[in-house]
Amino acid sequence: MTKEAQVAFATAKKRISSDKVYAYADFDKPFILVCDASAVAMGALLIQIHDKKQKIVAAASKTFTECEQRWSTSERECYCIVTMCERFDYYLR
């Protein structure tokens, strides 16, 4: 890894792990579930608005199996939504 890449990675890691990005769940506020699926994996962020800013409460991802990778884009996206709703059920109920 080049020096420039190392600096960029360290900066990204620092920003992502700061309290400016993450927040504790507040069950008195609504949750926003953001899902996305690619050809090989899916991921989701559970977000809440704190002080007029979006904050990440939780994140999850999963790599698709070979069989799942052959599904259509719509099937992968729907599977992502269902799976992540199940994963974050505790928060979303």
Image: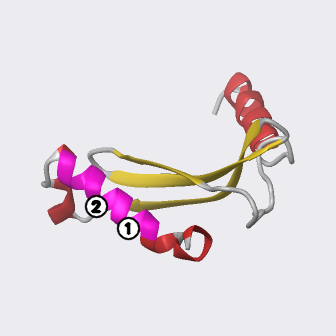
Q: Is residue 52 above or below residue 93?
A: above
Q: Residue 10's spot in the image, x, y percent?
A: 78, 37
Q: CA distance from mark 1 to mark 2?
A: 6 Å
Which SS does the magenta portion mostly show?
helix
**Residue indicated by mark 2:** 79
Query: Which residue is nearer to you in this view: 77 or 38?
Result: 77
User: In the structure shown, which secondary structural element does the residue marked by tag 1 occupy?
Assistant: helix
Residue 64 x/y as whole percent? 30, 61
- The answer to whether 12 appears left or right of 77 in the picture is right
Residue 49 picture quarter: top right
Question: Which span of residues is magenta-colored?
Answer: 74-85
Res 83 label? 1
CB-based contact (under 8 Å), mark 1 and mark 2: yes
Amino acid under disc 1: Thr
Q: Residue at x 72, y 57 (%)?
A: 29
The amino acid at mark 2 is: Tyr
